[in-house]
Amino acid sequence: MSKDNEKLALELAALTRETNKLGIPIMVVFEGVKASGKTRLSNELLLTLDAKYTHFIPTKSPSEDDLRYQFLQKYWNSLPGNGDINIYFRSWYAYYIEYQENKIKNNIYNKYHHLKRQIIDFEEMLKSDGTELIKFYIEINDKKRNEHLQDMKDNPLMSWKAQEYEKAISDDVYHKEMHEILKHASKGEWKIIDYTNKDEAITSMYKHMINRLKQAIDRFHKRNIDVDGDFSQSFQTKLLEQSLEKVDKATYKTLIVTLQGRLKELQFALYERKIPLILVYEGMDAAGKGGNIKRVREKLDPTGYEVNAISAPTDVELSHHYLWRFAKDMPRSGHIEIFDRSWYGRVLVERVEGFATKQEWQRAYKEINQFEQMWTDEGAIILKIFLTLDKDEQLKRFKLRENTIEKQWKITDEDWRNREKWDLYLEASHDMIELTNTDNAPWLVVPADHKKTARIEVLKYIIKKCEEKLWGVKQYE
Amino acid sequence: MSKDNEKLALELAALTRETNKLGIPIMVVFEGVKASGKTRLSNELLLTLDAKYTHFIPTKSPSEDDLRYQFLQKYWNSLPGNGDINIYFRSWYAYYIEYQENKIKNNIYNKYHHLKRQIIDFEEMLKSDGTELIKFYIEINDKKRNEHLQDMKDNPLMSWKAQEYEKAISDDVYHKEMHEILKHASKGEWKIIDYTNKDEAITSMYKHMINRLKQAIDRFHKRNIDVDGDFSQSFQTKLLEQSLEKVDKATYKTLIVTLQGRLKELQFALYERKIPLILVYEGMDAAGKGGNIKRVREKLDPTGYEVNAISAPTDVELSHHYLWRFAKDMPRSGHIEIFDRSWYGRVLVERVEGFATKQEWQRAYKEINQFEQMWTDEGAIILKIFLTLDKDEQLKRFKLRENTIEKQWKITDEDWRNREKWDLYLEASHDMIELTNTDNAPWLVVPADHKKTARIEVLKYIIKKCEEKLWGVKQYE
């Protein structure tokens, strides 16, 4: 390496110690045709940085297992923690081109526009949350490139790699698609580097990295944690004012068995059709979420569903984008995931308790809609259940819990503290339902003052929605 | 459910809240032939327990991806955290039978004895560490069983499941193998439950669970955290007394390039032959581990290796068996994983600083040997490098770091504190090398007072060992 580049490398390394200390997550993308020099260039970067917080993530063709998950799932799973630097050796862009070219999941993505939009949303969410996203596109002149390829073919230990290259997506296709993407990108979004002169390419990469990290550090110090986002009014949703006719005991007893039996059959039908089902439960404390979930899952085959009961985040979870811990638990095709509380914590408890800044929770409504759409785009069913309770009924249930030995463990000081903030939680719930009640992932608000009625209501709703999806309106033409 | 069983369920639920609070990890295994009732029974248990700390883990046939990893990898990955309960619906036993019956990785496991031993070691390690391991084998009479199967076939929505059953390992094979395992198990190791009478089966399961959890809680309170393990002498290994002839500057300059080029070729050869390489680095502070690793990786293809630089464990890692966080980063076939510090922390820093109890670190030598053997059993290469330094040379390097602006970040108060415990670390290192220098995963002790010499030495050693494996002695007959 030239002396100048060595100096730049030292400067960059020092800056990354700074971004690591500040907790800024960094994602660096390398795209480029085969044998363009992106291996050497990304390796140069990798060797410059401290292995303690640097990860190298190559994009491979989707495996059978990958295809059972959402398009971006593997990138959600591998998001950098705060202060980490992830180097993506080819990325969701190459992955997108492979989907499109090989017509992967073609029945779902007829024109693959969805995926382009998902990529934009994904990057936007990460950037809003403080991730520094740096994208390189590496080019090289044909002569140099053919030299690289020939070197590879001439080495008996590496010639198989050259053969693998020939099996992969052709460079012509990749090149054409990437240029389409680059053409529509905003100014400065991609840094294009010509690798024909190696030393100059390295200089160019280091300078761009240094420049971007300085900007990121600058932005970090200037960030204002208490500004508003794009939302400032409060809603009053009519959904919270409904009431239901009570189901009597005898009807409940026969109905619940029928509905559970039907849901079990639907579980198998969803499995066979590879449709994932995501159930989200939110609601007031003591509204009966646990009991309601129990009736939904009671007859299901336990090998095909999971319940994710959300507790306070671990330190690793806190050190990631807030959607990371939910994304990685999303079900694979044909499976059911039940969230007992969910990502909506961002606009409920985190809003009310101030764990998220104003800007963060106000931005979250849009982000959550985009997030959910990534799954429904691919045919997942998302159903969101909100159990409401009136304030007096909650008090009655709290007291019952305190006075019944087997139920005492269910009531904590935190429940009483939350109750004091009833109005704030109610306001947050109103806003949430109003702003995230989308066609593709609707809310069902269920008055839960009579638990048995609420259970029947929820079961009927899930069954109806699954039947619609399975045998009703055709979803994708 | 009968009233009696409801009472038992409540008792069990209360006990699991206790084991959760105490942080006792629990693993419950359900084995049994198809349609024996183990789904219903395990579901009964699942519904009894709090979803916050209960996970249901079905064993599926190994996927293509699974087969790129060590036999037990997926079970290492899914170990319960402290206080969690994992229910395994079929387990490493069924997995073992499938390996054997379908002759999976047959060239490696000629007689599959290795796997049986791995299972014993695996369970032993977990139990020693406080995991409560409860194993059920479910039986049923043929008449009832055929009724279950017929029910399934008669339901149009579930008949495909009956068909899947027919494709899987035959019950005869499974039954025969499991009975062989049960025959050789120690008394009380397995609880056999007859599901012919459902209510009695549930009673039997609850009672056994209650009994075992009570014992676990009892043992937890009685545990003595400061007793010795099976090791009480201190060793003086001759390996630490070696010296090396210095490599001069000119020789280094040409030699390093040749060796790095050769290692790169070997990386591709290992990849083609699907042999994973695991490099473990330990050594005194300032011995030059980072620089040594840099020379090893410098020319490698970054898509085929990773460096795992070990920091203090996160809270999630602390809440698992100490080997968990390393097991989950072990390389898949054909890849290279470099550990900059490793599981040997258990018998170095954790021993010296008292983070592990006496019994824990004294037990660890044997556990580590068993752990490493799980990987070498399957053809992985494990090479362990220990860089030694004398105390004066360390002082010189510490001072140099303090006095050089670009190196100041490398020296911390912790380094000075560790230096004060030099003798304790040296003693721990002696013991470690003496007790874990196995044929299948040997130590190379390298005097590192001259960094360049140490780099050449390590590169030569790795190359030699890889060549031996690739083209030398035949490993498996």
Image (spheres, coloured by chain):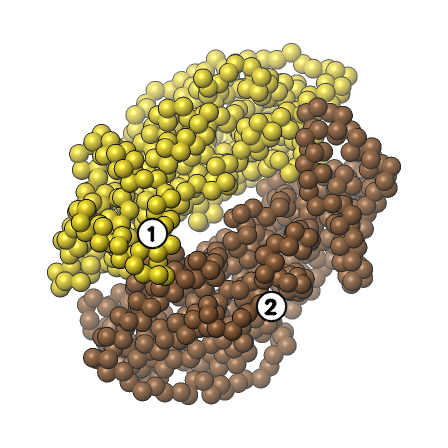
Chain colours: A brown, B yellow
Instruction: Tell me what residue is drawn at x 46 percent, y 70 percent.
Output: A471
Q: List x then y, in percent, for residue B36.
A: 24, 48
Residue B90 is left or right of residue A423, and the answer is left
Instruction: Tell me what residue is drawn at x 59 percent, y 72 percent.
Output: A366
Q: Which mark is residue B162?
A: 1
Chain letter of the residue carrying label 1: B
Residue B357 is left or right of residue B199, and the answer is right
Instruction: Tell me what residue is drawn at x 40 percent, y 18 percent.
Output: B235
Instruction: Tell me what residue is drawn at x 74 percent, y 15 percent.
Output: B251
Front position in the image: A69 or B317: A69
B35 is higher (above) or lower (below) than B275: below
What is the quadrant of residue B445 in the picture? top right
The quarter of the rendered structure image containing the N terminus of chain A is: top right
Residue B222 is left or right of residue A240, and the answer is left
Q: Residue A477 carries which label?
A: 2
Please state which amino acid type lies under the numbered disc 2.
Answer: Glu
Measure how far apart labels 2 and 1 are at the Cα level: 32 Å
Please state which amino acid type lies under the numbered disc 1.
Answer: Ala
Q: List x then y, in percent, for residue A191.
A: 79, 53
